[in-house]
Image (cartoon, rainbow, N blue to C red):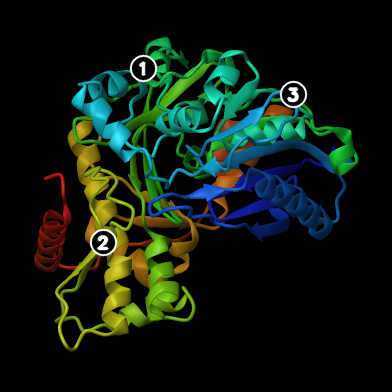
Amino acid sequence: MAGYVLAIDQGTTSTRAIVFDGDMKIAGIGQKEFTQIFPKSGWVEHDPEEIWESVLWTVGQAFKEARVEAKDIAAIGITNQRETVVVWERETGKPIHNAIVWQDRRTASYCEKLKRQGLEKLFTRRTGLLLDPYFSGTKLSWMLANVKGTRARAAKGELCFGTIDTFLIWRLTGGRSFVTDATNASRTLIYNIADNRWDEDLLEILRIPVAMLPEVKDCADDFGITDESLFGAAIPILGVAGDQQAATIGQACFEPGMMKSTYGTGCFAVLNTGVDLVRSKNRLLTTIAYRLDGETTYALEGSIFIAGAAVQWLRDGLGVIEKASQSGDLAAEADPLQDVYLVPAFTGLGAPYWDAEARGAIFGLTRATGPAELSRAALEAVCYQTRDLLDAMQKDWRSFDGATVLRVDGGMVASDWTMQRLSDLLDAPVDRPTILETTALGAAWLAGSRAGVWPDKQAFAKSWARSRRFEPEMDEKTRATKIRGWKDAVRRTLVEG
């Protein structure tokens, strides 16, 4: 066995398949975007069939580029957009509705109703999450209530619920495996992260039949074998993790106190807290970082809904830039005397504010404000929001003094300007790794190590390599002034006080 591992990285806007060789280097990539569906304001859906077709196509492309065949692949690792809900027929595998995406806000009023009933503390204690439309539970409850006949069919065991990983595994194995992993389960709002089981009380509140739920496995486990007809040979699926947990693994953040932040469509910062299940008092999420050999490692997570999406808005919405890559160079040209703040609450504000009704706003505009200042404001917004998360993590976990090195990944980290400003506003070093495909690498390592063709956790951690470290250069007075301005802008934006 040559040690080739296939990672399927099913994201929010595109699907990618990456073949890694025995040295954990990229041998081939396939990527395909798919349709974003917006039925109503605040609603976001995907076509599960289009996602499935994108997986098959990208795997074929990755194999072609790497010059490998299915028989050369030791194992498959899957990582996926989390919280997105798919329900399909157990008999046919056919989805009964479009997937409801993690960004979707249609259940905001239902979440508020549950809060008024005093239920948020119960959900948070059991799941580590907050009552927010972001998570899978209320989306699934909506589907059961609004797609005719669904609840009755689900109770009879005729329907299956899954996040994207579960749906793909079902399809890849020809319906023989109905499973998920602990990280994806921990994002559903119905999984007890202390007891590692589906929570019957929460299922009853949301009226979700237990018959439609998958089996929950470790992140490195036996998830089934692909149908031979798909790729020309059967391949074992041996690793699964939600995208942010996979990135945490890919960044080798295996020790308590290590932290990574991913800058893609949104931004997600994850702090490893080891065996400590830290219950946040600052509206962060407590989640499962990974579960290996039956042992659960926990994390604090801060979720920012809009990161790279703000740059996309500058490009597609305003036409301020032609390419996302221009934003850093343009920001560097901005007038330093203009304090322009963009609060990118296009779909509400995530951690640590959790205001679903807040909407985006720009403060500090003058007649002299132009594309450069708007670009800087969009990129700085990501940095300020990361600072908010770091501050909350310090307050939540006494063992964490904030004196950490932030390991970063995602599309935005290619911008030197953005990473330098991030370091400046955090007042902390920022490390950019040599392999930026850390999400796919994390999924591949889970599968490769389980297959016995890749190194164990300790050796994998030693292999992590840095391409550049960014050190703080901003003086404390400037930093304090800018952060004060940001906090004032957020305060003016919040609806829920």
Looking at the figure, which quarter contains the N terminus?
top right
Q: Label 3 belongs to which residue? A: 91
Counting residues from the start of the chain, the first of labels 1 and 3 encountered is 3
Residue 289 higher or lower than 363, as above or below: above
Q: Is residue 275 among the parts visible in the rendering? A: yes
Q: Amino acid at mark 2?
A: Gly
Q: Is residue 455 among the parts visible in the rendering? A: no
* Residue 73, percent from left and from top: 81, 40
* Residue 298, percent from left and from top: 39, 27
Residue 363 higher or lower than 24, as above or below: below
Counting residues from the start of the chain, the first of labels 1 and 2 encountered is 1
Q: Amino acid at mark 3?
A: Glu
- Disc 3 or disc 2, which is closer to the eye? 3
Q: Amino acid at mark 1?
A: Ile
Q: Label 1 belongs to which residue? A: 205
Q: Secondary structure at mark 2?
A: loop
Q: Secondary structure at mark 3?
A: loop
Counting residues from the start of the chain, the first of labels 3 and 2 encountered is 3
User: Of the numbered discs in the image, which one, if any, rests on residue 405?
Assistant: none
Q: Label 2 belongs to which residue? A: 360
